[in-house]
Amino acid sequence: MTISPRRARLLVPVVLLIAWLGIGGALGPFAGRLGEVATNDQAAFLPRSAESTAVIDEQRAFQQDETLPAIVVWTPDDSATADALRSAATRELASLAGAPGVVGTPSPAIVSDDAKALQGVVQLRPDLEENLPGALERIRKAAERVDGATVQLAGPAASQADLSDAFAGIDGLLLVVALVTVLVILLLVHRSVLLPLVIIVGSVLALGLACAIVYALAARDILRVDGQVQGILSILVIGAATDYALLLTARYREELTTGADRFGAVRAALRESWGAVVASGATVALGLLALFLSDLTNNRALGPVGAIGIVCAVVSSLTFLPAVLVLLGRAAYWPAKPRSTDGGGSVSGLWTRVAHLVDRAPRKVWAFSLAGLLACAAFAPTLTSKGVPLDEIFVNDAPSVAAQRTLGEHFPGGSGNPAVVVADADRLDQVVAAARRTQGVADAAGVTGSGRPGGEPRIVDGRVRIDVTLRSAADSDEAKDTVVRLRTAVHAVPGADALVGGYTAQQYDTQRTAERDRTLIVPVVLAIIFAILALLLRSLLLPAVLVATVALNFLATLGISSLVFQHVLGFSGTDSSVPLYGFVFLVALGVDYNIFLMSRVREESLRHGVREGVLRGLVATGGVITSAGVVLAATFAALGVIPLAFLVQIAFIVAFGVLLDTLVVRSLLVPALTLDIGRAAWWPGRLSRKRDEGPDGGAAGQREQATAGGGARPAG
């Protein structure tokens, strides 16, 4: 049986479609299963080489069973006093001994110095996971049997439970919000039904493949996944896959309008787009992999997970999507139809007007754009990234945060979160004395075998643990300053080999490590982007200009973010990792649009000269790049549905920054600079043709050619 050439040409797209549908059926469910291998253990977020991390390792030796403390806080009603409730509270705490998940005997109730509150500590097993809410509920019910008081639960156990609640259903919620948002935007952009659905299906297939790979690696402890990484992966893949699909389908539609058949249109679209898509994907993937240089575990985790997601998005865009376009042909745009136009005719509309504006006065356009960005960037130094206070970690007032606030009102600020000192046992007295003399310390005492300060301290391998209660709240700047002084004091004790850890020390070490990471990783990412742009555009000057513009866009975004966070959203600061995450996402993703624009500008410049090439490239890509920017901004904005300050801040920075890059940097600043510089922008490379330039090859020699965007073809 002889297969006709037409059917033979359909064989490859049919095989690709079947393969992807098989991948979707077999691996798609993994998009909802990453939670099975994810961990939200905050200890895993710490710097690997920090002093506070070393203390965690030593602490384990002092506990036969590692525990997760839950702190019960009673606030007596007007009809009762803390002293009167102490016996009942101690009795109810003792009744929890032996309850499921409880380790050892809970502490007795302690009355605050102001006699207006009580607290007790119940140690829980750290591996309770989904059983943690049940254990906390048993503690709450026992505590509520004390009449005449309001009960709250604070401490690491309560915080971990609230964190798990925040990430509960993250797979389904984020996916639905992101996909619905993207679908609505695509329907408005393409005014068709089939093509948006095809693009959505392609992005979901890419996400399923990425999640399956990440799941397999995480299950074997090769990669680490937490709730933040899990959420960012979904948004990153959906946004990137949609952007790449928009670029390819715009070129496909453009080819169809010239009269090409679906096979020729797909071939041409792939030929002209694959370089930009691969370069864009490589920029983001390598930028994310640069996070391997970080000393923070969660940063290192995001790098490979995000890179896997980007690679899957690129593969889906260059295989699944072209296969479906070949099979659907013009029907992909149903019920709309690609209108046939003369490829050499001028195009009316918004982007032709923008091109006219840039062409008339390129120097004024880039000068005003640059001035606006610099004005926004002037506020960037006001963005505080020293960490988020406990009462701002959750966007809503989580129960554990409210309980911690109550605890801080009646007990020393560091109650429930002591600084932990581990030292040689034969220097215990000297270390305790040095700690107590430290400004900002309320008390210090060796920890006994029961896990509580006071009494005969427990000695393990010649080492002893000392709990140091700070006067200031554990998450405050004052507490961090106290930890610095405490380290200086105990390090000075001869022969003690003392180390200082605990919550406050961990926050301080994380902050310092994040500052170090930014200093190291930011130049590396910029160098990666420059190298990829230089290879793609075969130039050195133009990549340097593009890198400078995206870096300026990032600083301008930080400036606006600082104003919004402080004066609109009410944040006193950001997590120490937010600027680095924002930089990697915004710069790596933002340069995508410059890649899409300038690869087209180079293509058109080779045919028509630099001036005409810039204007044609701007008109041809304006619509599709703006649509891609809106889609990416909307998908990252979906992170805001998770009530965590960290993700809300990342969502705003990336969403606003992408829009600023799309509407100002890529639409005005870059085209105007390129037009003003002229042929020199492509130095040291050369364009094979020269047309429409005057003696200097720049804008000054181009005034005699007044037609802006003439002959540019629509991008769809």
Image (cartoon, helix red, strand yellow):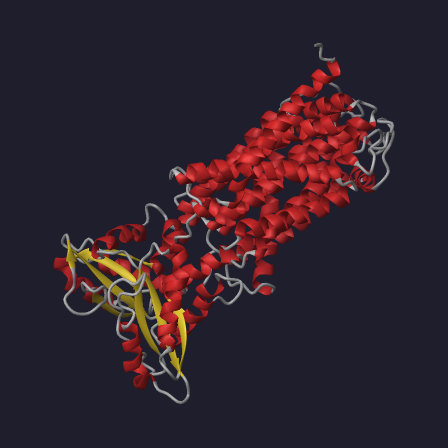
Q: 287 or 262, which is in the foreground?
A: 262
- State whether residue 612 appears in this view: no
Q: Position of residue 385 (x, y in %)?
A: 48, 55
Quarter of the figure that contains the C terminus: top right
Residue furthest left in the image: 426
Q: Position of residue 671 (x, y in %)?
A: 72, 36
Quarter of the figure that contains the N terminus: top right
- State whether residue 271 appears in this view: yes
Q: Taking 638 as reference, is 149 above or below it?
A: below
Q: Position of residue 688 (x, y in %)?
A: 71, 18
Horizontal side of residue 685 vs 584, given as left or right? right
Residue furthest top in the image: 2
Horizontal side of residue 357 vs 15, given as left or right? right
Q: Quadrant of residue 675?
A: top right
Residue at 65%, 38% (x, y): give it: 201
Residue furthest front in the image: 1
Q: Position of residue 715 (x, y in %)?
A: 77, 34
Q: 453 or 667, which is in the foreground?
A: 453
Q: 517 or 266, which is in the foreground?
A: 266
Residue furthest bottom in the image: 79
Residue at 41%, 74% (x, y): give it: 406
Residue at 80%, 40% (x, y): give it: 351
